[in-house]
Image (tube, rainbow, N blue to C red):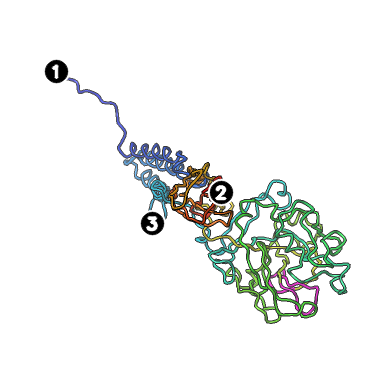
Amino acid sequence: MQRPERERKEPTEFNVIVKAKDLVKHTFTITNSTERYPKKYRFTLVNRIQDKAVDIYECVLEANELDLRDAQEYRSKLERTRRKGKQLSLDPADGSVLQQLNEIKGGGTMSKTLGSLSVGAKIEVPVLSAYQSRFGSKIVFKIADKNHSGYPSNSVTLITEKIIQLMCFDAKEASNSNSDRKQYGNNRYQHSNILQWLNSNAAAGAWYSAKHSADAPPTNANVWNNYNEYDAWAGFLAMLDPKFVAELLTTTQTVARNTVTDGGSYETVTSKMFLPSTTEVGLANENNIAEGTLLALFSNDASRVAYPTAQCVSNSEYTNSNFSTSKGWYWWLRTPYSSNAYSVRSVYSDGSLNSINAYNGYYGVRPLCNLKSSILVSDSPNSDGNYTVIYNSAPSAPPSITAPATCYSGQNINISCAAATDPDGDALTYCFERSYNSGAWTQVQASASRTFTEAVMKAWNTLKYRVRAKDSYGNYSAYTTTFSIIR
């Protein structure tokens, strides 16, 4: 008797391959959702997650091709597979991408805060295209300290990694009654050209204004040997990404004064960009005055050595065989030399203490600034080793506000507004404010509710309400205001 022919089935894939395919499909489906993944994740985490999912699938396929009968091939491919698995960081203890994917799927955030980075970590700040010939496409800052004593609370202090430009501290002042300042410039930091330029958002040629009666701009004629004038430049802040500039915190700095013309002791200066002091970089206190406290980044001469950027070297009118990107160079501090009216402390090319005339245009600048610790940065450095800031945008104003046209004493009136939108998908708080009889505005409710109810008081002849939205990062929208409500 002839045996019936067994039905042939098409070969099927192993379950692990099917699951790997499903993982890829699932990953691409959820990461392509703009609701789950706001724009701040699109170019940092999403691409990495998708790449890792594909890598897992390829790794499974490669493992499936192992010929178990060939011991050498088996060992070779197994070792490659193990290495691949380590590259994928599949262990959740290592902060795996799959774990990160799950956290965001559930509503968590994967961006790091600036405050979570270590001292010495690098942050890049974009330069506007019109000024990239001077600074390149970005300026790289290093974290110099966190929660530094005397600086804004919950802040991170940044300093440029390298010397970004050569420029004088202050121009010579031809009309100054002090002969030294007339010839060599002024060492009082609060009057210095460099401080004014660092904190200006003005267009080219418009940043300078006189800070005292004898003040002078850093023109070609007012700097040493006509090197590196900068009076015609735009202000420093005008050259940077405006989103970065908007995040800068105002910082109070302690500055010693010289004992010859400025009375000795010290004064305080407030600004957003500033120069470090001798104290802050770990050099001697000038005239026994501590100008702040030591920044964590600085510990010895080697830690203070700074190199100029390629743009700094190429843009400088001053040239020297030792002035190159591969050699340490001199950079300004804010501290005056206390025994005269014109010399300023600086860091020497080997990291030691130095001083030089204020009008010398061949010394470099490394500005400091402070940002909130809570600012978000990319979850990992880019190919240049730098973190990038992820800026949180303010919500839109509530599109409308509704209120009665008239009211009477004791009446409960309802005020409501339409929903605002937040470009980052943040939760919103609606802040309602009231003004009566054309008086000052008073906040009356701040909550997630878009409706507010209160009783009208007898003294209120006219009423107005306004509302604005606030996101979870403290960014406010513009106000939306009612017409006057007449009682």
Q: Amino acid at mark 1?
A: Gln
Q: Secondary structure at mark 2?
A: loop
* 43 is higher (above) or lower (below) than 433: above
Residue in the foreground of this view, choosing between 373 and 206: 206
Tell whether label 1 touches label 3 (CB within 8 Å): no
Q: Earlier in the sequence, mark 3 or mark 1?
A: 1
| Residues packed near mark 1 inside 10 Å, few (<14), some (14 to 19) or many (20 plus) | few
Q: Amino acid at mark 3?
A: Ala
Residue in the foreground of this view, choosing between 436 and 100: 436
Q: Secondary structure at mark 1?
A: loop
* 212 is higher (above) or lower (below) than 446: below
What residue is shown with label 1? Answer: 2
What residue is shown with label 2? Answer: 479
In front: mark 2 or mark 3? Answer: 2
Tell whether label 3 touches label 2 (CB within 8 Å): no
Q: Position of residue 316 (x, y in %)?
A: 78, 57
Q: Earlier in the sequence, mark 1 or mark 2?
A: 1
Along the horizontal axis of the image, is 8 left or right of 131?
A: left
Tell whether label 2 touches label 1 (CB within 8 Å): no
- Which residues fall within the magenta stretch? 335-354
Q: Position of residue 57 (x, y in %)?
A: 39, 40
* Residue drawn at 46 percent across, 38 percent down: 32
Along the horizontal axis of the image, is 356 left or right of 20?
A: right
What residue is shown with label 3? Answer: 93
